[in-house]
Amino acid sequence: PAVVLSTLSRPGTNPSRVLVSASSALMDDAILKGDAFLNRRLLVHLFSGFGGGADVSNFTGKDLNDTRVHIPSAAATTLGIMLAVVLPLALFGAGALVFLRRRRL
């Protein structure tokens, strides 16, 4: 995939960096396992560019096994009603209002 790394440097500030990939396949396991273009090494060098050449191996993993969102029952019911009833009715009402106003023009 095509990849571009752009850097903006201004005196007295840290440089800003933007990485753009033409495809989400950049992070695909099948692509990273291939060694035709040294894909893993390329990705490590790209990310080290974000840190100004710093070592990128200092990323720490995050435990995602026991991540739960605790919502009280009343809040869950209110949120469900808002998303299932109020929001669709408001969208329908806004659409009807636009339709009727445009029809009069």
Image (spheres, helix red, strand yellow):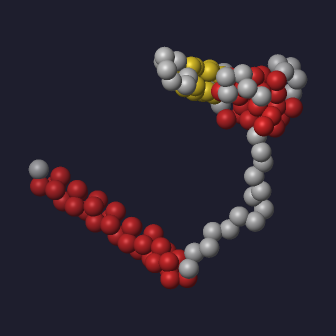
Instruction: Name the one closer to the observer, 28 or 72.
Output: 72
| Residue at figure coordinates x 75%, y 52% from the top left | 62
Residue 77, x across and y down, in percent: 50, 80
Q: How many marks?
A: 0
Picture quarter with the N terminus? top right
| Residue at figure coordinates x 29%, y 59% from the top left | 95
Q: Is residue 102 toward the left or the right of residue 93 in the image?
A: left
Q: Is residue 86 above or below residue 58?
A: below
Residue 61 can be seen in this image: yes
Quadrant of residue 24 within the rendered picture: top right
Q: Is residue 19 above or below residue 64?
A: above
Q: Is residue 28 toward the left or the right of residue 85 in the image?
A: right
Instruction: Name the one closer to the observer, 98 or 80.
Output: 80
| Residue at figure coordinates x 53%, y 77% from the top left | 76
Residue 83, x across and y down, in percent: 45, 69
Which residue occupies the extreme bottom position in the image? 74
Quadrant of residue 50 within the rendered picture: top right
Quadrant of residue 56 within the rendered picture: top right
Residue 31 can be seen in this image: no
Instruction: Name the one closer to the observer, 99 or 13.
Output: 13
Residue 8, x across and y down, in percent: 52, 19
Instruction: Name the one closer to the observer, 6 or 80.
Output: 6
